[in-house]
Amino acid sequence: MKTLIKNYKLLFVLVLLTSFFSCSSDDDATEPTTAELLAHKWFIVKQVDNSTTPVTEFIADECEQNIYYNFYNDGTLVAESFGFNGTDCESTGIEVVTYVLSDDENQILLTSEGSTNATNIITLTKTELVIGSNNYELHFKR
């Protein structure tokens, strides 16, 4: 009988420990929405030209890696370009446009000076953004 009680106590402790360690605070966390994932500052990694055979990749150099798209929650996109001026890496311009996500959240609709252009969201994770069309892709990281 003592062995049976001892086994039940051991089983109870094991069940308690298993349930304690299997629960974590992020079990109920919801996945971020497309808008939440997008609303960050993204730095260029490379550009892919799909219109050429073979496909051409342009890897961002150390200066071009400063190029960013900063998507804000209020629908503002700030994009800054960089390039070498001689041996100095300098900003070559900042553009501010508005954006909205398409209803299916597969496209970003960019509006500037009354003109709207759509770009496809090819990949969007917490650390990677790939946007483009059939002819090109822009790859970004956070």
Image (spheres, helix red, strand yellow):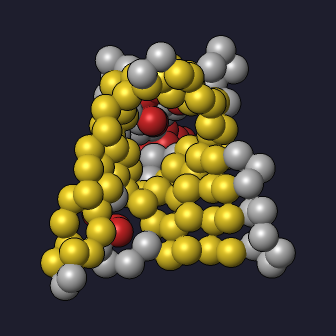
Residue at image coords 21%, 82%: 86
Residue at image coords 48%, 23%: 111
Residue at image coords 33%, 43%: 79
- Looking at the picture, how far across and down is residue 4, in whole percent? 58, 45
Compared with 50, 14 (above or below) is above
Compared with 106, 140 (above or below) is below
Residue at image coords 68%, 75%: 56
Compared with 54, 39 (above or below) is above
Q: Is residue 2 visible?
A: no
Lateral position of residue 50 relative to residue 125, left or right: right
**Count of residue discs:** 0
In which quadrant of the rendered image does the N terminus lie?
top right
| Residue closer to the observer: 75 or 24 | 75
| Residue closer to the observer: 123 or 117 | 117
Lateral position of residue 95 relative to residue 48, left or right: left
- In the displayed orientation, state which residue is furthest to the right: 53
